[in-house]
Image: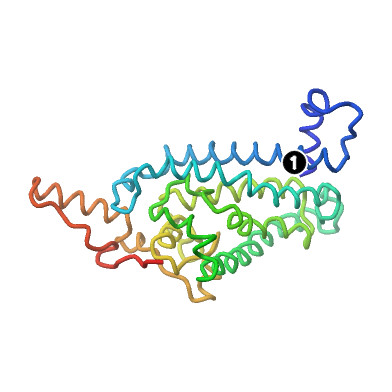
Amino acid sequence: MDLVLSIADYYFFTPYVYPATWPEDNIFRQAITLLIVTNLGAYILYFFFATLSYYFVYDHLLMKHPQFLKNQVSREITHSVQSMPWMSIPTVSLFLLEVRGYSKLYDGIGEFPYGWFQLVASVLSFLFFTDMLIYWIHRGLHHRLVYKRLHKPHHIWKIPTPFASHAFHPLDGFLQSLPYHIYPFIFPLHKVVYLGLYILVNIWTISIHDGDFRVPQLLKPFINGSAHHTDHHMLFDYNYGQYFTLWDRIGGSFRNPSSFEGNGPLNYVKKMAEEKHNSHGGSGYKNEKLFNGECTKTE
């Protein structure tokens, strides 16, 4: 984050905000700046990409599902907006350690003997390392001793929209983001790559809540996408992974997404709409069970 900090200082904070007597490398000044920049960046990423996803990707037919809550979108946004500043406080403490030089982040490609190869390998390493840790953290948050207090607020949204992506209890949100921040303290990682990955994981978090269940056929066995995560919200005990299905398969929590089998929540809404249309306004239909006869689990 020192790249972002330097740009923010050069173009804004040094000339317009802080007194000239306060040096840029002062730890308190850095903490304040990081807190402002982190929150501003989080809000921009959240509203920009969640809004794009909501209007151009998310299928609004899902809002007719019986488990879609009243005023859900506004409630998701409110929850996210209130939680993100609290999540940012422990996050900034880790960013501050990075800026102060305690991480293994580096600047130049030539600093390591394998150069570009190591840079590419570090991206793959980051994805698999964080996916593994997030799986176990996420699964741990479903333990009965902590679930109700920490993770249940995120599971209020049975049929999530992209705006639910950051609607966490603050401690829950920080714990699930912790692997991203741990990685550069253990493994070398280029500073620009780290910043790019930080943006990418926020976009990915939004994407797995967007209700777009399409995955290229070749990648279906490997990628944990929106279809998997929607089933996780509805069925609770399955598909804890972030990017890949690997750890769900190892941990015995993998479930083939219901939408891939033609009986997901969107299929349910379309089927009920068709039945209602065919009934010509008769007795209508009853919302007896979801997923073509399978009830969702009650936490």
Taking the image as shown, residue 19 lies to the left or right of residue 36, namely right
Q: Is residue 137 above or below residue 18?
A: below
Q: Is residue 112 left or right of residue 220?
A: right
Q: Give the percent coordinates (x, y) of residue 173.
A: 59, 54
Which amino acid type corresponds to the residue marked 1 in the rendered image? Leu
Across and down, in percent, residue 148 comes to 49, 63
Residue farthest toward the top in the current orientation of the protein: 16
* Residue at mark 1: 34
- Residue drawn at x 9%, y 50% as measured from the top left: 279
Residue 296, image x, y percentages: 34, 65
Q: In the image shown, does 40 or 19 lie closer to the viewer?
A: 19
- Image side of residue 134 versus residue 162, left or right: right
Q: Is residue 119 above or below residue 134?
A: above
Classify 13 as above or below 198. Answer: above
Identity of the residue drawn at 18% across and 57% down: 286
Q: Residues within 10 Å of mark 1 (few under 14, many from 20)?
A: many
Q: Quadrant of the N terminus?
A: top right
**SS state under label 1:** helix
Residue 9, compared with residue 187, is above or below; it is: above
Q: Is residue 37 left or right of residue 21?
A: left
| The C terminus lies in quadrant | bottom left
Q: Nearer the viewer, residue 121 or 137?
A: 137
Residue 12 position, x and y percent, is: 77, 27
